[in-house]
Amino acid sequence: MSILSPACRRRCAAALLLLLACPVAMAALPVVPGEPALAPKVARPAARLHLVGKEAAQQPPRARTTLSPVTDSELARVRRANGGSTAQHLKRLVIGIERDAAGTVPLPASSDLQWIAVDDGHAARMTVTSPEAAAMRVSFALAGVPANVEMVFFGSARPERLLGPIRVGDIADRTAPWWSPVTEGEAQTVEIFVPGPGDPRSLPFHAVSVSHLFAGPSSRFEKRVQDIGLAGSCNVDLACSSLNATSAFHSVAEAVAQMVFTDGAFTALCTGTLVNDTDGSTQAPWFYSANHCFENDSPPYKTPAQMQAVASSLDTLWYFEAASCGSSTPSTAYQQLSGGATYVYNNADSDVIFLRLNDTPPIGAFYAGWDPNPISPGTAIATVHHPEGDLKKVSQGTVLGFSAPGVAGGSNQFVQVRYSSGTTEPGSSGAGLFTTNGSQYLLRGGLWGGTALCSNPTGTDDYSRFDQAYPALAAYLSPAAAPATDYTDLWWNPDESGWGLSLTQHASRNIFGVWYTYAADGTRTWYVLPGGTWTSGNTFSGTLYATTGPALDGAFDPGQVTRTPVGTGTLDFIDANHGTWTFTVDGVSGSKVIQRQPY
């Protein structure tokens, strides 16, 4: 029972609302500036085909698969996904549908292909066609395929535009089917190159499913009316925006990329922003967007593993913008990255998703700075986005205040804006909300959705609040110290075989370690290091635990699982391949020289 009087409770509530409405009274957090992307230390090799002329034409019938045309019921599913009552305010755009050919048309496998001897190995091609597709993606099973196998992709509408080479070993997750880059036209061809003298017909490489896209980059992702609708016409090209005349805005605009990803039965578009962190020695490709881009429309919401499955399918399109003001031609600088991303964090109530791209962003991209403080009503804003998947657009407006649109059934606050120039549309979801501090444009949130459209110029949009997301993102964006490199591997002392460490460094930079060793009586045992803290770029420390649990041949009983702290462990790395393991276990201390275990 409350001991406060009703009048006092009303005064306290009013005071709380005043605090929420007047964030300037709170202590300000440091603002982090952006920076241009550095050139990669190793240049990407140029895509080239190993098969030319008559060799390229030697595809047996089983290496070419043509699916049946898309049905009216498949089109209806796409329309419902873009226009259903639960999605009417969200601004994710579905542009394609997954077509599972299993049981109807067999998709090609390695054993179906015509393998031809080329310099240093063998090469073959397979082609999958979905009639009248504007663009295509194909998923491939890669589990068990050697890491040195390479793939180059091209589409029937733009066969001269080669995407690759993509090395199987560079694909982060090969346990599930991997989605190819977007190619233009109704047919996608992949050329596979297998180095070495072996017989490649036995490789476990095969196509699994097909994504038929109703739009592609050359058409600026314009869609046929009968398929999924048309975009509005009031948006402002980046090249035409008055803001683009300033170097500060032009820089932050190159932090924005279009997102193409496959989620269950659909391929969809959103917008995201490359984000800087406070570690000046590295450039980790953190990426901020909207949770609903990857999320289910309603409960049950996705698990982290399901979020990762969508993140693994992510392609990002960079510099997808008009070549000049008034032009409908994409810039010649346009690039597509197809490495997917690592899922790091999401929050359905706040509509925030935070990823780490698996590919290095291209030269000329920009890591956006950010302001972790609350934004004030009346602040001028700008957003950079891809409405209806079109070339990059700019909208300007003003913060009206804060709203609570009930995202995912929650009560979290969002930033509400109204535009004075341009608008947003499906495909704009996740677009960064930017404000200027006089020298740079800084990220303040990401687009959820709203009522703003070209046909409703007085409508409003709601953006996630970066200041509310920041406490969960600080461990990644503002680490006290960051590791100098990725130390994931098996570590040992070659002069003391029989014990060792297994270290896994997550995208969050935290380390999970397992130490296999022996107790004082010689019995085998292990301890776990489930996390810790980087005290410098080369030193990581955490608590060691001993664990017990039910026997492997019995029913699992969570009540038998125990985790007991037994001491501490510290990793001091001399360089990328050598270090020292220092420990204290039950009062006994020691130190061991370690190095990566070679294979």
Image (tube, rainbow, N blue to C red):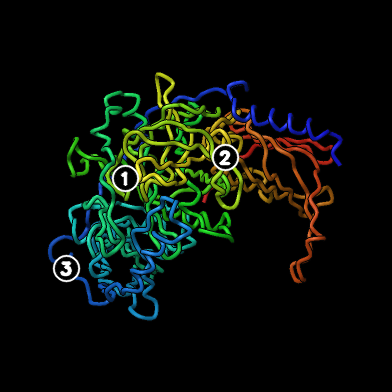
Question: Which residue is pictured at 66% across the width and 46% down the height?
Answer: 513
- Comparing 490 with 105, the one in front is 105
Q: Quadrant of residue 158?
A: bottom left
Disc number at residue 454? 1
Residue at image mark 3: 57
Above or below for 469 versus 406: above
Rendered location of residue 176, percent (x, y): 47, 62
Q: Secondary structure at mark 3?
A: helix
- Tags 2 and 3 touching, CB below 8 Å: no
Of labels 2 and 1, earlier in sequence is 2
What amino acid does circle 2 point to? Answer: Gln
Question: Which residue is pictured at 44% across the width and 21% down the height?
Answer: 437
Of labels 2 and 3, earlier in sequence is 3
Neighbor class of circle 1 (other Cα within 10 Å; few <14, some 14-19, many 20+) is: some
Left or right of residue 397, residue 342 in this image? right
Residue at the extreme bottom: 103
What amino acid does circle 3 point to? Answer: Ala
Marks 2 and 3, how far apart in space?
59 Å
Q: Secondary structure at mark 1?
A: loop
Above or below for 11 versus 191: above
Disc number at residue 413? 2
- Comparing 173 with 131, the one in front is 131
Marks 2 and 1, how far apart in space?
25 Å
Residue at the extreme front: 7
Rendered location of residue 401, percent (x, y): 51, 33
Disc number at residue 267? none
Q: Secondary structure at mark 2?
A: loop
Q: Quadrant of residue 155?
A: bottom left
- The mark closer to the camera, 1 or 3, is 1
Marks 1 and 3, how far apart in space?
48 Å
